[in-house]
Image (spheres, rainbow, N blue to C red):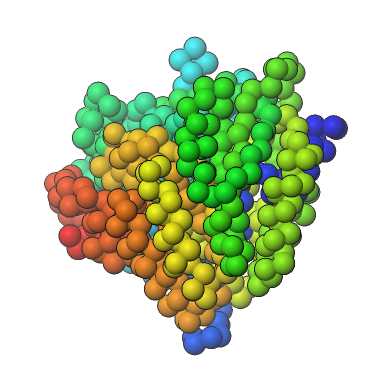
Amino acid sequence: MRNLTRRSLLLAAGGAAGWYASDLFHARLPVLDGTRSIAPRPANNILNDASGLSPTPIHRHITLTEDPGDALIAAVRAEMKSAEADGRAFNIGAARHSMGGQAIPRDGVAVTFDNGFVEADTAARTYRAHAGARWSQVIAALDPLGFSPAVMQSNNDFGVAATFSVNAHGWPVPFGPMGATVRSLRMVLPSGDLVTASRTERPELFSLAMGGYGLVGAIIDLEVDMVPNTRLRPTFEVMPAKDYAAAFRAAVDDPAVTMAYGRLNVERASFFRHALLITYREDEDQTDLPPASGSGWMAYLASRVYRGQLGSEALKSFRWWNETIVGPKLGGGAVTRNSLINEPVVTLDDRNPDRTDILHEYFVDFDRFDDFLTACRQVIPDSYQEFLNVTLRYVASDPDSVLAYAPTPRVAAVMSFSQELTARAEDDMARMTRALIDRITEIGGAYYLPYRPHARVDQLTAAYPRAMEFATVKRLVDPRLVLRNNLWDSYLGVL
Ligand SMILES: Cc1cc2nc3c(=O)[nH]c(=O)nc-3n(C[C@H](O)[C@H](O)[C@H](O)COP(=O)(O)OP(=O)(O)OC[C@H]3O[C@@H](n4cnc5c(N)ncnc54)[C@H](O)[C@@H]3O)c2cc1C
């Protein structure tokens, strides 16, 4: 009970790294009309994604529930073949929390996998997961065995193959993106061939599929690393933002630190001037670990404070004070690794039909972090957007994926905006996003691809110098361009 209370207080202080976004609106289909939004009834053949801003006509949407065996493989082959025969696109999605149609095939066949098969091998410290298994299902399977996913996002709603396909990162350290923890996978290629890919078997396909947004093959299952679940205790450090990069680097290099993240203050008057670093180390007591919990009702209360920041500088200051003064004074109680990452997106649901949560994410080298702060101070407060949060994570360098966003070790800055559902807000967001991407690529950084498709094509190639190589090899693997989504249609396919 004591631990629960401390954990709850930590959450109330905004201590969970999962302050990422609110629940997003699959069903909402806004028509952007000046400063008003109109929500028509969803049409049956329209598919949307987490932003609610990507209503896209599709031919058909089917859900496949088979285990990762012959029946699933046959069903995927049949759907791909029939899409190809009709000249249609084919694309698999999981939670469709990407925000720019990255999991939607325009006028094509959209497939959703729904099966939580997970089989652990405790001796090898790996598990085999259905491509569509959600992290909540993986945690539920590994937790009783005393294990935990090595890397996943800060929320548990997403699919395992989807996570590999965007090459997402989390906040355990000192890991690279999730792809770094995948040993091998099986996928059906557009030719219909079922192949295994890994760092030693068809490594070029493995590198293409990692962060390849479903454009290379339909992943059936994956063999992924797991790590022991442990009881962890947090430490809080408040500092000027200019000192964050050095402090974070030292934390990541400390072998005792197994989870770490940071925050910056978001009040306009002192935007990005102060930082908070939270590190987790193993507790002395590793006996009788409780089952993985979610964060419960206190997280819900904390989410109300988070939402209260909208249009209120006072509440932004209150939240920062709560996180940096109250949270550290109370100290954090011990909590298991699995409980920390077992956080559903719905906790932060804003329940506001006139707004949507939009994420941005940027990756910069440690020695350019000050330049990153300057760029953000010059661009973000001038926009019309409500900026709610930034979380700072570590991503080790990624030598594998062709579309790598962290070719060197980087600080990842995950930003959460609350955007009005109006044409004016959409235009303003697009303008600000492009300005920010220009500034970040100028300092050698990259932006993240699963969010809104506001970047220009030249910005994508500046951030991902191997984009042309990706498109060229994709055309060889998929000459009839069956595997398509908006990332292909609007970006890679025009290179
Ligand atoms: C609230 C929120 C929190 C987030 N937190 C983080 C975070 O902590 N770290 C981070 O890095 N990112 C984070 N993201 C981004 C997130 O990782 C991506 O949006 C990811 O795509 C979400 O998973 P999904 O199941 O919704 O994927 P979907 O949007 O369904 O799919 C993503 C991509 O994977 C492909 N794909 C899916 N399944 C298969 C398959 N079987 N075979 C081939 N391709 C497939 C799809 O075609 C698509 O291109 C967050 C996003 C949100 C909305």
- Where residue 149 sits in the image (x, y, percent)? 53, 30
Which residue is depicted at the point 35% across and 31% down? 185
Question: Residue 373 location, x and y as percent?
Answer: 46, 56
Q: Quadrant of residue 108?
A: bottom left
Residue 223 image point, x, y percent: 41, 27
Q: Residue furthest right?
A: 1
Name which residue lies at 23% across and 56% down. 461
Looking at the rendered image, the quarter that the C terminus falls into is: bottom left
Q: Residue at x 78, y 43 (%)?
A: 9
Q: Nearer the viewer, residue 431 or 320?
A: 320
- Total numbered labels: 0
Q: Nearer the viewer, residue 64 or 99?
A: 99
The reply to whether residue 77 is visible in this rendering is: no
Quarter holding the N terminus is: top right
Horizontally, residue 60 falls left or right of residue 88, namely right
Taking the view exactly as shown, the residue that stands out farthest to the bottom is 34
Q: Residue 86 or 276: which is nearer the viewer?
A: 276
Image height of 368 relative to 130, above or below: below
Q: Residue at x 60, y 67 (%)?
A: 269
Q: Is residue 430 left or right of residue 481?
A: right
Q: Is residue 443 visible?
A: yes
Relative image position of residue 402 (x, y in whole percent): 25, 42
Q: Quadrant of residue 271?
A: bottom right
